[in-house]
Image: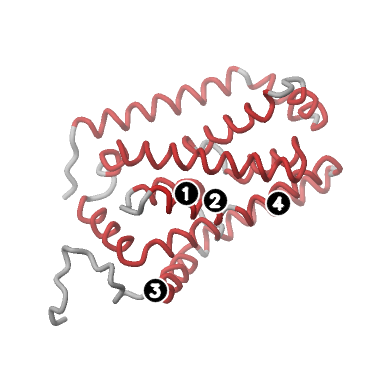
Amino acid sequence: MKKTRPGDWITLASGVLVITGIVLLVIWQWPQISHLFSNPTEIRSYIASFGIWAPVIFVALYVFQIIVAPIPGTLMNFAGGFMFGWGGGVGLSWISCVIGAVIAILVMRAFGRSLMRIFISEEKLDRFDKYVRTRGWAYLFLLYIVPNPLGDTVNYMAALSDIKLWKLLLMVAVGRIPSLIVGSWLGKQSIHFSTIHWIILAAGFVGLLVGVYLIHKPLENLAMKLSVKLLPPNSPRTPASQPRGDPE
């Protein structure tokens, strides 16, 4: 049976308050937001009006999205290509992913396990830790590369492991590159999109999300099998809690 502590509920309540505040802010500013998004060129002009601060604002928003995850990161990547071109979009999105991962992992390692105990038993968390210690680095790396329902919440999942921060950041820095390249390229091309192009893109994006959700179990199983091949269970990194040489 799961055991929770008063601090766990305080952490959860704080998160709910922050998300509620964000939703209320969006509702309050919705007329301005909807006006901007009704004209793509106006968005670019608006962003350009901030001058040198435009990239800084974009990175800040992207990092915020990674930490709070109110919208899929793919949309921010798309927006980066739209506003700053293909090269600029990839570069700024990559920087944002690394910075966001650092903050998300550090925050989760400081408070996250307390929050996770509300939903997951300590026994299950320990099993996850054990798996990651033996061969989970390959599994996590595949989650960063392959589109999956977890999205940027993979950072929080990875934070529960004892993998060193620099190794996790290396996974992020390398694993996110393919999706950043594709997303930024689409964003750059979108300035020339007609209505039918936007409809096709939206339908494709929704279809991708639905498809990944429907086959996320096979994807997860495939990632596990590949991770076992990359780092077999008899790896020398056997957890100390598991006696070596004991008969099965």
Q: Residue 193: which disc? A: none
Mark 2 and mark 1: span between their CA atoms? 6 Å
First in sequence, mark 3 or 2: give its number: 2
Instruction: Provide the secondary structure element on which disc 3 rests.
Output: helix
Identified by mark 1, the residue type is: Leu
The percent coordinates of residue 85 (x first, y second) are 77, 41
Q: Residue shown at 32%/32% (left/top)?
A: 12
Q: Residue shown at 50%/39% (left/top)?
A: 100
| Of marks 4 and 2, the one in the foreground | 2
Identified by mark 4, the residue type is: Ala
Relative to 4, say whether 230 is above or below.
below
Residue tagged 3:
228
First in sequence, mark 1 or 4: give its number: 1
The percent coordinates of residue 24 (x first, y second) are 52, 21
Residue tagged 2:
173
Q: What colour-coding does the image apply? A: secondary structure
| Of marks 4 and 3, the one in the foreground | 3
Instruction: Provide the secondary structure element on which disc 4 rests.
Output: helix
Mark 4 and mark 3: span between their CA atoms? 35 Å
Kindly give the residue lying farthest to the top in the view shown.
28
Q: Residue shown at 65%/50% (left/top)?
A: 180
The percent coordinates of residue 95 (x first, y second) are 59, 41
Relative to 126, say whether 48 is above or below.
above
Q: Few, some or many C-alpha atoms within 10 Å of disc 4 (few <14, some 14-19, many ≥20)?
A: few
Residue contact at pointers 2 and 1, CB within 8 angstroms? yes
Which part of the image, by quadrant, shows the C terminus? bottom left
Residue tagged 4:
203
**Left or right of 2 on screen, residue 159:** right
Residue contact at pointers 4 and 2, CB within 8 angstroms? no
Residue contact at pointers 4 and 3, CB within 8 angstroms? no
